[in-house]
Amino acid sequence: MEKETTRKGAGPLETPQGVVLHIADLRVVFHTYVGTVHALSGIDLDLREGKITGLAGETGCGKSVTAKAVMQLLPSTAEVLSGRILFGGEDLVRKTPSEMDAIRGKRIGMIFQNPRAALNPLFTVEEQLYFLLHRHEHLGRKEARKRSLALLEAVRMGGAKKRLRSYPFELSTGMCQRVMIAMGLACSPKLFIADEPTTGLDVTVQAQVLELFKHLVYEVGSTALLITHDLGVIAETSDYMGVMYGGRMVEFGTTEDLIEHTLHPYTQGLLRSSFTGEDDDELHYIPGVVPDLRRPPSGCVFEARCAVCVEECRVSVPDMIEVENGHRVACFQAGAAGIADGGKAGSTRGER
Amino acid sequence: MNIGRKRRAADPTRPADTRCRPEKSAAEGGTGGSWGFFLYRFRRNKLAAVGGGFLLLIVLLGLIGPLFTSYNPTKPDMKSASLAPSFAHWMGTDALGMDIFTRIVYATRTDLLIAVMAVLGAAILGSLYGVISAFYGRVLDEVMMRALDSLQAFPSILLGLAIAAALGPSLRNVIIVLVVVNFPMYARLVRSQILSLKEATFVDAARTVGNNNARIMFRHLLPNSLGPVYVQSSLNVGWSVLMAASMSFLGLGIQAPEPEWGVMISQGARQMVQGEWWSAFFPGLFIFLFVLSASLLGDGLQDVFDPRRR
């Protein structure tokens, strides 16, 4: 891609072939009263058309900030230092607020972690849907009601007719999330962002909602970005996955590649600390804590917690390097001998 | 495109219906409506009901009271001056021979008008002020709040008298004074609500479906912050009447011979030394009952709206 061409001026803003959302070198800082937090330090991400891409990582690694940056919903304390977010031939970073208002809901849909809090408590389901359909599809009351019913049926909501008149507090959390999904997909957006969509839900409801999410995204022909800290969710749902750590992307590839041929020690640690149900019933964890992003380390962000780090890791930041078709990793030690069975690199609760 | 139709075509067996059933029945209990719940809470609070009842009676008195009296509220009748309460004059007459009951009835209209207009005006102005200040924040918020500080630095009765003295005494100006004196309270109330509400997820969610700033402010944030405003308004109604009466008493509000509770007390007070207690007592009693019932109602509303007591 033409990296240096346009920072401020016009110029070609074309996304690569088959890519719906192209994020390049996105840097975001938060100016807080305890200092400047480097939330994103140069993220590159391509979302392939018609695919679901998962983003995994611990709290504070920058997953949600990435989503909010795409939506241009960063809080006022945030500042985008550099980077481009190309969507449909336009750079979202340079959009005015009113231009974004026209894009949100119509061309990009989004759902949130806590669906109950995401619905305005004073509006019925019908009113919530009506605004959206009226604003973007210019539907009247009657048509909007018809469409809303169809949407609620599409998200498999029992008794759709009655649910139209319900307020959010009359719905279960799972049903609220179904309403959110209906709203998110109402205008068949090109891009659909789900920020921890199942975190607050019961495990059984979680599976239903994920199934629904997957089904509808494919059916509408949308492209989805699924953000979660639950690798199980990603493994079941996404085609591609990225792993983030400390405001950087550390590994990216197809979900299969990432899980079968894990290259980054952090991804390995994550996989080992999730419950697999295999005979090894020890619960693993990654020692140490997330680095303080007010003073990001000069070398690799994961260096302090990494079991296989070498001198080079402390000094310079590893770039994302393509290992095999599309599988990219940011680690000097990736593919080194110790990594293949690097599963033994972490610690277990039993040892300490 | 129509997702619903497509889905059914893709999945004719519809296994989802059975899956949804438990959720459906779980939520059915809540469809009684928020009004039923509201009334239930309210009826439980006896004192508030008493307050509300009294308030209703006073409003009724203002509306249909003139049917029970044939006297003119502003026409002096020196032949029947300073009469004690009797069957002809239920609450006696004042020094100019005007029937006290008749004057109280008409004064109720004036005072209710003042109270309602003043509270409505202050609540609307204050809410808008608070929403804008909190929503845009930063410098604007700072400037707007410091302006309120300087307004509130004056004792309210002094500020009211100063404004009334500048504008001249009239019904309209009393309302203006009350709005100016009261709106900072609403502004602060709404501002504090919005400050916490604007971080709520539903605001982000509202943005993600394409709501602009104005809609976020007035359709999403403001309606969600009105609960305390209702409570404050109801408490404020009583206080406004008290303030209006005080201003009239001091001669900068409604002017005699217009019937108004404060004016009547002011006139009646001069008669007290001669033992004519009724000409000041009855308007005073009405102010007392009105303010008391408004406060009781307000306290009751507070219980209803306060989530911690639910």
Image: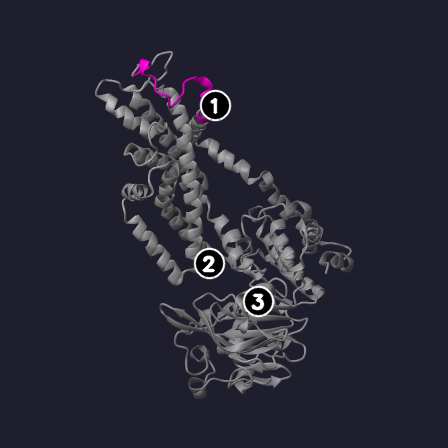
Q: Amino acid at mark 1?
A: Ile
Q: Callout 1: 10 Å neighbours few (<14), some, many (20+)? A: few
- In the shown orientation, is residue B307 left or right of residue B277? right
Residue A177 drawn above or below residue A10: above
Cα distance in 3D space between marks 2 and 1:
49 Å
Q: Quadrant of residue B136?
A: bottom left
The label shown at residue B199 is: 2
Cα distance in 3D space between marks 3 and 2:
22 Å
Q: Callout 2: 10 Å neighbours few (<14), some, many (20+)? A: few
The label shown at residue B64 is: 1
Give, as a single range, the part of the protein colored magenta. B62-81
Which residue occupies 62% across, 60% down? A184
Closer to the camera: disc 3 or disc 2? 3
Chain letter of the residue beneath label 3 in the structure image: A
- In the shown orientation, is residue A36 left or right of residue A187? left
Q: Secondary structure at mark 1?
A: helix
Colour scheme: one colour
